[in-house]
Amino acid sequence: MVESHVRSRAAEEGRDMSYPPPPEALTIAVYDNHTHLEIADGDQPLDYREQLDRASAVGVRAVVQVGTDVETSRWSAEIASREPRVLAAVAIHPNETPELEARGELDDALAVIDELAARPRVRAIGETGLDFFRTGEDGRDAQQRAFEAHIEIAKRHGLALQIHDRDAHDEVVETLLRVGAPERTVFHCFSGDEELARICSANGWFMSFAGTVTFKNAKKLRAALEVVPRNLLLIETDAPYLTPTPYRGRPNSSYLMPYTLRSMAETLETDPSMLATQIVSNTELVYGSWEHEPVQAV
């Protein structure tokens, strides 16, 4: 079993790194469809069990635990196999692929992902995609090759695809249209504008919103949220990152997701319970039941 990786930024950044207080519990319990339980953060890091317990107490019923490399993908699959509140997504993050390619290890890593994808509680391939923010021109070919390989794995196993898309909207869309997107495709931590939201909507791709949608400077993101069909909406934390307002900058965890959901409901001028009910239905359509057999391949 992989131990949690403790990350504490308090000393180096000199700011409050305690976990925020819990929000008022949701009336309709929802799912966090993208989190990283293996990363412990803050002054007093929380074990993954405590994170799940805190989430359950405020109406976040279960999570999709997401791998970003071979080690964390194996950890995710293992935790999901014995924790009923967890399903797993497995992949090699695009920022990891150039170095693996340079060492001649990318194909072996992809083979591990393919093997893990056969496990019954692994329900998605992700996070995969393209990231041109941290990777320069010399690493883009490796990212592209890995992205297309992940798409093929998802389709062959009948799994959802969780996309990481940073500064690469056009290239991600072009790839999906060219090679054919899996039936259930999710833009994790959606960061596009209204135009990208309309493209995703036209193709039936799901859009998952994180704490960024609550930030004061996220007007374009909220404008994009307003044009998303309700049946394509998902919600996530991407914890321990992207903590929602009013606790931006402090450690994030699935139990803080009610802040994001209520902010989304306010933007959409709808009742939080109605929005939660729709998101629950959407999430189960993408990943299947946390209690029963996986979604069958089409």
Image: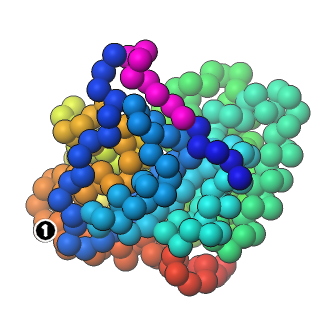
The structure residue drawn at horizontal position 13% and vertical position 66%, both measured from the top left corner, is 270
Above or below 240: residue 27: below
How many C-alpha atoms fall within 10 Å of the one at disc 1: few (<14), some, or many (≥20)? Answer: few
Please name whichever residue, 206 or 170, is drawn nearer the observer in this view of the structure: 206
Lateral position of residue 118 relative to residue 126, left or right: right
How far across and down, in percent of the image, does residue 96 sit? 68, 34
Which kind of residue does numbered mark 1 sit on?
A: Asp
Residue 255 image-quadrant placement: bottom left
Residue 10 in the magenta stretch? The answer is: yes
The structure residue drawn at horizontal position 72% and vertical position 35%, both measured from the top left corner, is 97
Task: Give the magenta range.
Answer: 6-13
Residue 208 image-quadrant placement: bottom left
Above or below 204: residue 296: below
In the rendered image, the residue lying farthest to the front is 44
The structure residue drawn at horizontal position 81% and vertical position 33%, both measured from the top left corner, is 101
Lateral position of residue 106 relative to residue 292, left or right: right
